[in-house]
Amino acid sequence: MLSLACVGDWLDQQLRTNPGGLDGVEVVWVGPTLDALTTHDHARSADVVVLDLDHLGDDPLSTIDALRQATRAELFIVSYHFARRDLLGLLRGEDTRVLQGPLTLSALRGQLLGLIVRDILSGTDKAPRQENVSSPNEMPLITNSRDDITTCPTCGARVPTYALQAPN
């Protein structure tokens, strides 16, 4: 399953009102800052990172380059409200998409559809992490309900509950 990390709280708010809005995508981390993103293993290992242009600071190009080095993300989605056209052109690249915000879940899922389909066709669609599951047929569906999300005590990021549990 495609994993996604998001800087900012807009995604968390939208998932509360529409839990099925990102079917085929596992939201592994939602946090407040880029610093928090680079300190969490789940966030650094996400396939996709979604953030707002405002989070990139005064030098967005070097910040995106630093994120490329710090994470294993294959796609960065940068949303913006107001920005210079030349800056938006410089940000666009093979692994960076620039979209005018505010983003909706359906718009985000549309941007991820190619990666979702690729994961399904290549067979890398991983089963959700669950304990005490005896067979795949008995595996419960994971929802993005409020009960599955926990606030990280270190940085305040919203992460799935299993991400904060100690490994067995």
Image (tube, grey):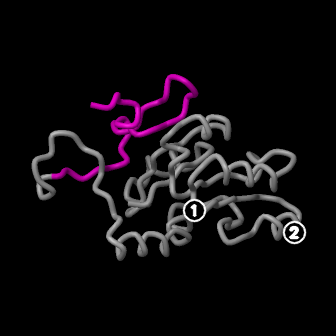
Cα distance in 3D space between marks 2 and 1: 24 Å
The answer to the question of whether label 2 and label 1 lie on touching residues, with beta carbons closer than 8 A, is: no
Q: Position of residue 100 (x, y in %)?
A: 71, 65
Quarter of the picture containing the C terminus is top left
| Magenta span contains residue 74 | no
Q: Which residue sits furthest front?
A: 69
Tell us which disc is closer to us: 2 or 1: 1
Q: Is residue 29 left or right of residue 139?
A: right
Residue that badge 1 annotates: 74
The kind of secondary structure element at disc 1 is: loop
Circle 2 sits on which residue? 85
Above/below status of 145 relative to 19: above
Q: Which residues are magenta?
A: 139-168
Q: Amino acid at mark 1?
A: Glu
Image point 40% across, 31% down: which residue?
164
Image quarter for residue 22?
bottom left
Residue 103, position as x, y percentages in the image: 61, 60
Q: Residues within 10 Å of mark 2 (few under 14, many from 20)?
A: few
Q: Of helix, strand and loop, which one carries label 2?
A: helix
Q: Amino acid at mark 2?
A: Arg
| Residue 165 painted magenta | yes
Q: Earlier in the sequence, mark 2 or mark 1?
A: 1
Image coordinates for residue 23, horizontal then vertical, percent:
38, 62
Please report the residue visible at 75 percent of the width from the left and 69 percent of the height from the top.
Answer: 92
Is 156 situated above or below 52?
above
